[in-house]
Amino acid sequence: MNSLHPFLQDIGAAAFSLGHEVYIVGGYVRNKLYQEFYAKELPETYDIDLVINTNAIDFTYKLQRFVHENTDDHHTFEIIEEHKQFGTIKIKHPHYPKHNIELASTRTEVYEEPAAFPKVTLVDNFKDDNPRRDFTINALLESINPPKSSHPFGEIVDHSSGINDLRKGLIRIFHDDSFIEDPTRVYRAARFMAEYDFKIEDHTLSLIEKAAQHPDREKWLDKRKNRFKIEMERIEELSEQKAKLAKEFLSNWLSKPSF
């Protein structure tokens, strides 16, 4: 990851010059702190998720110009895909071929029906963006902003007590409708529980059990079939023992009768 720092610093400098902030969020930050707190090694994370408090797609095109004008050894990164309805864009830099970098706009999400894709509204701050995430341990931010910014490069920003939950080994949801809005989060909870030997926080567990008894549960499973498949593939990538633990949890969830 250290090899990627020059490009991340360029992104942070470009954002700062335009009056914005940008952070790493999600799995990379979670795993980095997990290794620090528990002194356990994890595989290197090559998928880097960034969040910026503006339209990420518009910013990325401005970033191309900024890097070209301010970097001596400039190499144009490739735009892999963009999703305007979600305000996200994926890029690849030739110097760092192993890394997949996605930039997301800070946004709010409203689910008009369970398991549907959300209606997205872009916002300009990180606190409003946080509740759309799955668990507090995945909402931690690591700054890639320059030294003169309010949160300089490498600083961890925690708006949701994610560090406390990570230290305690707790998987905690943000709000009561989270598993109904996106039921694939149940699979992610099972994976994190098994992978890190964490506990699902009591209220979060009660919400999983409530979702299991929802009359439309089978419809959710059918509606998001591909996403459930992806989540199960990630569980299969765990060690045999950990994958078994996660699948036993899910089997119990799926065996609960819905009414």
Image: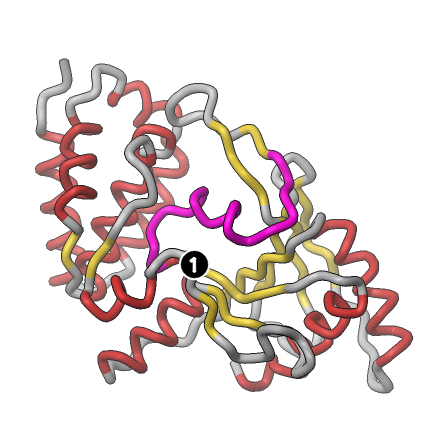
Residue on which disc 1 sits: 159
Q: Is residue 50 left or right of residue 250?
A: right
Note whether 166 is above or below 223 in the view shown.
below
Residue at 10% across, 46% down: 248
Q: Which of the 4 quarters of the picture holds residue 215?
A: top left
Residue at 37% across, 67% down: 30
Q: Between residues 67 and 233, which one lies in front from this camera angle?
A: 67
Residue 93 at x, y percent in the picture: 69, 70
In reply to whether residue 105 is colored magenta, the answer given is: no
Indicate the amino acid at tag 1. Answer: His
Residue at 27% across, 17% down: 216
Disc 1 element:
loop
Residue 188 at x, y percent in the picture: 29, 48
Q: Residue furthest right?
A: 69
User: Magenta segment range?
Assistant: 121-137
State how many labels appear: 1
In this figure, which colouring scheme has been used for the structure? Answer: secondary structure
Note whether 28 is above or below 248 in the view shown.
below
Residue 240 at x, y percent in the picture: 15, 62
Q: Between residues 122 and 28, which one lies in front from this camera angle?
A: 122
In reply to whether residue 122 is colored magenta, the answer given is: yes
Crowd tier of the residue under label 1, counting other residues whose Cα lies within 10 Å: few below 14, some 14–19, many 20 or above: some
Q: Is residue 220 left or right of residue 74?
A: left
